Amino acid sequence: MNRFQLGLYGTEILENMRNYSLFLFASLLVSQLTFGQINPNQRKIQVAILFDASNSMDGLLNQAKSRMWNIVNELSTYRYNGEQPQIEFALFQYGKDDLLKSQNYIEKLLNFSTDLDLVSAKLFGITTNGGSEYCGAVIKDAHKTLEWSQSTNDLKMIYIAGNEPFNQGNVSFREVIPECLKDEIFVNTIYCGNREAGIREFWRDGAELGGGSFFHINSNEQIRHIDTPYDAQIRQYNDSLNSTYVGYGRMGREKKALQTSEDRNAASFGWANSAERSVAKSKSNMYLNYSWDIVDGLDQDVISLDSMKKEDLPEEMKNMTLEEKKAYVDSLATNRKRFQQNIQQLGEKRAVFIAEEQKKNPNGSEESDFGKSVNKSIAEKATKIGFQKESN
């Protein structure tokens, strides 16, 4: 079983399968093992983000929330020998008084996962509180507790963001970061403040030790998304796209609700940000839902209509004949492909419009923020190890 499946079972499936039938659990397990053999040579881009969640970091978290889907869409443009890599995210928070002192005020929120709705939900669930920020300790936890790829062809990145001295706590960053680099995990630091303070408080030293990049950002600067003439139409197609997702089992109902809630979270930062999420959702090789959606599940042979029990079927399919079930799922798949293509076409026009608007204010487009820092450093490292970037 590969890292994605273990993470998926560890964080989601085992928690939600208690009331599933033994048969469904077994069939999912076997098919997941099979799915993992489809392309054993698929490359990965692994991104672990460590957020300072102390009182002063609301601005940082808002930047991350409003840039998440832009980062996803940027990552979707990378290829390795013509193939799109698997994108995995992991999340940590550190520096909060309500976290355990015995754990250095650190909490792992998410193991490496390709479930983008879950990544979004965990990110939006972070709240701030005063505390002690131990950068060395959280980097050590990310290195030791996450399941990093062993392939030298995969890109492995840690991003730590915060604004307190980098050398706090009893775990020395000067000892743990070189250990990351030995495993070809690059440590990138994002200091929330001016450059001089970041250098003085050792954030640049951390990046240099980790073979990564040092950034300084104004975390209180609100992200200014560019609205386009295509956003409203993309939003309408997104609603139509959602209608093609039909969950099976209890996880299906929960995940369908999560899809809707993360649409709302994205929209809370403006319709332009919502459009970014919709574009990401239109990319079926990025927005992976075969663990709960019946269309994706059948497409990836995770489930079979011939053998699914009635109680595990979506409500609208429970009284259908087998032929009716197949016809229904085929119609969902056809409509989904059409809505995805419509969103992608509008997304291309949207990208051109944004690029033209940015040319009118080139200085403004260079301002640093959390998302631009992540995108820039990934671009620099990915090309060095053989990834190619296609147009967005």
Image (tube, rainbow, N blue to C red):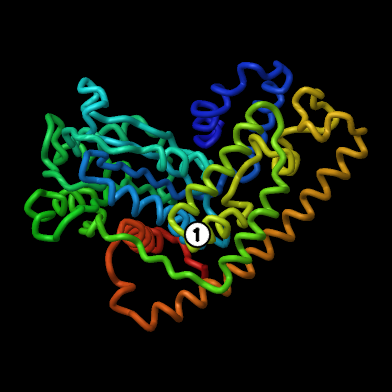
* Left or right for 232, reference 106: right
**Residue at the (16%, 39%) spot, across then down:** 173
Query: What is the x, y in percent for residue 70?
Result: 45, 59
Viewer can see residue 79: no
Query: What is the x, y in percent for residue 304?
Result: 79, 33
Q: Which residue is mark 1?
A: 73
Who is closer to the viewer here, 218 or 196? Answer: 218
Q: Amino acid at mark 1?
A: Asn
Quarter location, residue 181: top left
* Left or right for 65, reference 27: left
* Left or right for 143, reference 303: left
* Left or right for 167, reference 121: left
Q: Quadrant of the N terminus?
A: top right
Quarter location, residue 182: top left
Viewer can see residue 30: yes
**Residue at the (83%, 50%) spot, across then down:** 331
Query: What is the x, y in percent for residue 272?
Result: 49, 63
Q: Residue furthest left?
A: 200
Regarding mark 1 in the picture, which secondary structure is present there? helix
**Residue at the (27%, 41%) spot, across then down:** 180
Quarter location, residue 13: top right
